[in-house]
Image (cartoon, grey):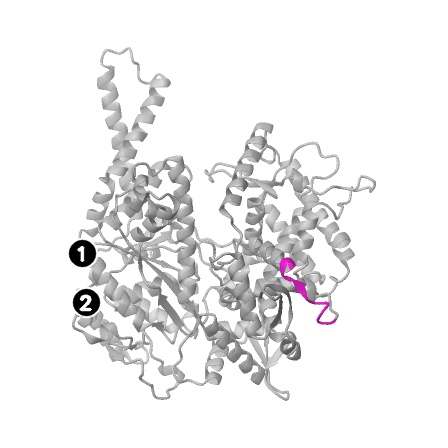
């Protein structure tokens, strides 16, 4: 398909793959009107044994014999799927100079310990011989351990017969759940094939960095690569999925198993680095998830730097010359796991994966109709080129890092580079993401006032939202010439009556959100496009909520800017912000909202913005567009406010002599319990504000700001769990005149809470500030007292020595200075 003289290579045809045939159609091609069940897709439903036994057997025979493209013989990339591949890879890893050097270092350390403990006597006349013999024994033992670890870890591309059968089996399962198949952009696929051909010629790896919302993510990537004739990537997978039968299947289909935590195991860390070096040196394709785990909230998570750090080290050390980075977005009409995500976010512990649950869950989704999967590939880029460009900005001398990557100065530069690269990848993923109809529906239903919305109003708001997505540079999933009403019906059908209900026996069919918590997953798929507008609107709300006439609701530019800066800093770990800086992005956002007639800007003679208010046109339509942006961000503001209020409960009780440190998990669980109580009592508008993910992110931000101190240890198996306490300068005071030493609603932490609250949605019980300063505060204090009582009983792990506390405080002061120098907050 991809030949140099093929004229379609440089065009952008629509890609239609149905069964065994590939048809390339010009972009101007207008397809005939068709039923929704005959959509063009990368994967097409195959025959089933019960309904079409002969066709089913024919398909199986084609895969087993490797007929046509199923043979997977002429792949673009390095040779894989041959007998002896695993042994060849294992030998390359264990003989890597990096690993052998580490084994030698570990042997030296062990010998030193044995000498100090008297196991080896230096006075023996044959000491040198005994030491050499002992060294050989130790190195041999470590080598055996390394070989066992390598064998358990590496992916095993051994058999083409296996991968043909695996492709057929997985496609059967996937197309029964996602009945509209996998969709890709033909333009992106053609570009990717060109890049893959060039990478094959240079013996370079393509490193796929996809978003991660479902276990289907890596399945869909493998299916796409197989069907398009690209070498399958080796996929980084957590060893929690390595359970009997399934683990072996996945390992032979491309999975490499790694531990969830490396702790202080230097041998294992070096082994992972050696394996990644070997893959990249050999030009084998590679895949890891930039977010680490699956997103339970629907939006992108902050980047995790573990595997990225290994990749970066391979390039910066010079062990690997270059690799190609390809960010990938995977979007779903409906994610299989969302119901389980809601359960986890509400505090129910995640169950360990096992075969029984896998089989029962797998069989239960086969009869579902979950719509389609859309996969989009960003334009690939050279990692070496990116590193050199960034290092020139940071150091002016990129080559100096090769000499000693791990020196303190270079380690700091590497961390900056790692962070910049992580957020660039997330930005690239957002740039190519498509918005699915289910996301449009979920967003509209959760950003309207009132219980429900009529069909005509739902269509009108979805049309408006679709236009706004396009204006912001986003893309809505393509559905050919299908009218909007059909697309909406398709989306409602996929979401199902458990998420969206409809009342039909009234003047107009009216739709309403049944499960707002689960539906928020789909709303969060669009929030990245409008985060700047949402922060501006929430900052303006500090004046709009006061009511009165237009003049009374105006806000000065300086006041708005300060609140936007505050909120953007607060949500630094939640959202991916544009990178041009606060002043540029704020100006651009305000002008955009002015052009949309949402806001009215007053300027001086030089054109400088003086104040901002709602436009008359926006008031005339009931503030619907302004409210839309507020509704997007309000649940996150509520959650952060809840986390901050829960910190008040971490104030030590009166008379407590011991310095008690609270377990982080218990503190966050208590914050969630507080939130559930406040929601049912009317002091919290959004039940989704109690989700563990956002509360956890808020606590992380509080730690970064020095509001709380946290003690963590790397060796998670033997050490006590992470613990925290309020920093002294943020600790509220108590009223000694009251019997219980009631918390006073004042001080630095209280002012911080009030500033967050200024942008909260106004609702029941919250017009009276005394509600928060008395009843809510009292509840937080009561729950906090339980934590201190448990800590006092529990003991040793709840206390730190004065020396340890001082080291901790010094570390936090240094960290805060570093973050200030980075200039972290930007809209």
Residue 156 lies, in percent from the top left, at 25, 53
Mark 1 or mark 2, earlier in chain:
2
Image quadrant where one finds the N terminus: bottom left
Identify the mark at residue 71; answer none if there is no mark: 2
Query: In what element is the residue under mark 1?
Result: loop
Note whether residue 128 is visible: yes
Q: Check if residue 691 falls in the magenta segment.
A: no
Of 256 and 56, nearer the camera is 256
Residue where numbered disc 1 is placed: 82
Q: Residue at x 46, y 38 (%)?
A: 714
Query: In what element is the residue under mark 2?
Result: helix
- Are there few (<14), some (14-19), or many (20+) residues within 10 Å of tag 1? few
- Position of residue 121 relative to residue 233, above or below, is above
Residue 113 lies, in percent from the top left, at 36, 22
Of 818 and 661, nearer the camera is 818
Q: Residue at x 18, y 51 (%)?
A: 84
Q: Is residue 464 left or right of residue 249?
A: right
Q: Which residue occupies the extreme front position in the image? A: 605
Write down the quadrant of residue 327 in the picture: bottom left
Q: Residue at x 33, y 79 (%)?
A: 40
Q: Which residues are magenta?
A: 549-559
Note whether residue 305 is visible: no
Of 282 and 350, nearer the camera is 282
In three-dimensional space, the C-alpha distance between marks 1 and 2, rounded to whole angstroms, equals: 13 Å
């Amino acid at each position: 398909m991809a030949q140099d003289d093929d004229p379609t290579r440089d065009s952008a045809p629509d890609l239609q793959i149905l069964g065994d045939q590939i048809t390339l159609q010009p972009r101007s091609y207008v397809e005939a009107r068709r039923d929704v069940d005959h959509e063009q897709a990368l994967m097409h439903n195959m025959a089933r044994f019960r309904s079409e036994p002969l066709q089913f057997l024919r398909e199986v025979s084609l895969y087993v014999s490797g007929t046509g493209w199923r043979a997977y013989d002429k792949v673009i990339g390095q040779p894989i799927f041959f007998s002896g591949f695993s042994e060849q890879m294992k030998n390359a890893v264990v003989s890597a100079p990096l690993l052998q050097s580490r084994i030698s270092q570990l042997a030296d350390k062990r010998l030193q310990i044995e000498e100090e403990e008297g196991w080896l006597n230096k006075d023996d006349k044959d000491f040198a011989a005994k030491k050499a013999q002992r060294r050989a024994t130790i190195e041999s033992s470590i080598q055996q351990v390394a070989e066992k670890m390598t064998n358990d870890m590496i992916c095993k591309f051994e058999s083409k017969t296996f991968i043909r059968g695996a492709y057929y089996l997985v496609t059967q399962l996937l197309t029964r759940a996602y009945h509209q198949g996998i969709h890709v952009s033909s333009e992106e696929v053609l570009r990717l094939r060109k890049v893959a051909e060039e990478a094959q010629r240079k013996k370079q790896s393509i490193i796929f960095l996809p978003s991660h919302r479902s276990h289907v993510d890596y399945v869909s990537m493998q299916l796409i690569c197989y069907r398009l004739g690209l070498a399958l990537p080796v996929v980084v997978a957590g060893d929690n999925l390595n359970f009997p039968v399934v683990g072996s299947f996945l390992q032979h289909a491309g999975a490499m198993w790694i531990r969830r935590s490396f702790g202080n195991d230097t041998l294992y860390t070096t082994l992972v680095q050696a394996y990644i070096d070997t893959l990249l040196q050999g030009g084998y394709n590679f895949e890891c998830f930039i977010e680490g785990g699956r997103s339970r909230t629907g939006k992108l998570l902050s980047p995790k730097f573990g595997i990225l750090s290994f990749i970066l080290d391979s390039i910066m050390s010079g062990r690997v010359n270059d690799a190609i980075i390809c960010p990938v977005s995977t979007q779903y009409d409906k994610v299989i796991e969302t119901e389980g995500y809601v359960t986890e976010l509400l505090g129910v512990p995640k169950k360990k994966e096992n075969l029984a649950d896998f089989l029962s869950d797998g069989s239960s989704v086969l009869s579902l109709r979950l719509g389609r999967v859309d996969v989009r590939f960003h334009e690939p880029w050279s990692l070496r080129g990116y590193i050199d460009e960034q290092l020139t900005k940071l150091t002016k001398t990129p080559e100096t890092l090769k000499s000693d990557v791990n020196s303190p100065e270079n380690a700091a530069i590497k961390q900056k580079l790692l962070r910049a690269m992580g957020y660039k990848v997330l930005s690239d993923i957002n740039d190519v993401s498509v918005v699915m109809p289910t996301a449009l529906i979920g967003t509209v239903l959760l950003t309207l006032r009132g219980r429900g919305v009529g069909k005509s109003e739902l269509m009108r708001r979805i049309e408006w939202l679709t236009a706004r997505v396009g204006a912001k540079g986003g893309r809505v999933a393509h559905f050919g010439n299908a009218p909007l009403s059909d697309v909406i019906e398709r989306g409602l059908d996929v979401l199902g009556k458990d998420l969206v209900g409809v009342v039909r026996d009234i003047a107009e069919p009216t739709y309403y959100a049944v499960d707002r918590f689960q539906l928020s997953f789909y709303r969060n798929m669009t929030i990245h496009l409008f985060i700047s507008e949402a922060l501006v609107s929430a900052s303006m709300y500090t004046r709009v909520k006061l009511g009165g006439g237009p003049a009374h609701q105006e806000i000065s530019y300086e006041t708005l800017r300060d609140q936007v800066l505050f909120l953007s800093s607060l949500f630094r770990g939640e959202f991916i912000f544009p990178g041009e800086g606060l002043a540029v992005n704020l100006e651009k956002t305000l002008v955009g909202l002015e052009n949309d007639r949402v806001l009215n800007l007053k300027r001086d003679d030089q054109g400088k913005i003086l104040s901002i208010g709602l436009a008359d046109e926006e008031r005339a339509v009931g503030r619907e567009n302004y409210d839309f942006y507020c509704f997007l961000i309000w649940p996150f503001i509520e959650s952060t406010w809840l986390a901050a209020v829960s910190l008040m409960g971490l104030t030590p009780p009166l008379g407590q002599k011991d310095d008690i440190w609270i377990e982080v998990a218990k503190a966050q669980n208590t914050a969630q319990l507080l939130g559930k109580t406040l929601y049912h009592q009317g002091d919290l508008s959004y039940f989704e504000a109690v989700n563990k993910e956002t509360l956890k992110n808020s606590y992380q931000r509080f730690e970064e700001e020095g509001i709380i101190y946290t003690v963590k240890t790397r060796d998670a198996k033997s050490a006590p769990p992470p613990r925290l306490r309020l920093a002294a300068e943020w600790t509220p005071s108590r009223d000694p005149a009251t019997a219980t030493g009631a918390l006073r609603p004042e001080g630095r932490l209280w002012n911080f809470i009030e500033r967050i609250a200024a942008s909260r949605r106004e609702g029941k019980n919250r017009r009276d500030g005394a509600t928060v300063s008395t009843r809510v505060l009292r509840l937080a204090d009561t729950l906090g007292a339980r934590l201190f009582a448990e800590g006092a009983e529990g003991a040793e792990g709840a206390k730190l020595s004065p020396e340890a506390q001082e080291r901790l405080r010094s570390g936090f002061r240094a960290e805060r200075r570093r973050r200030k120098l980075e200039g972290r907050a930007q809209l």
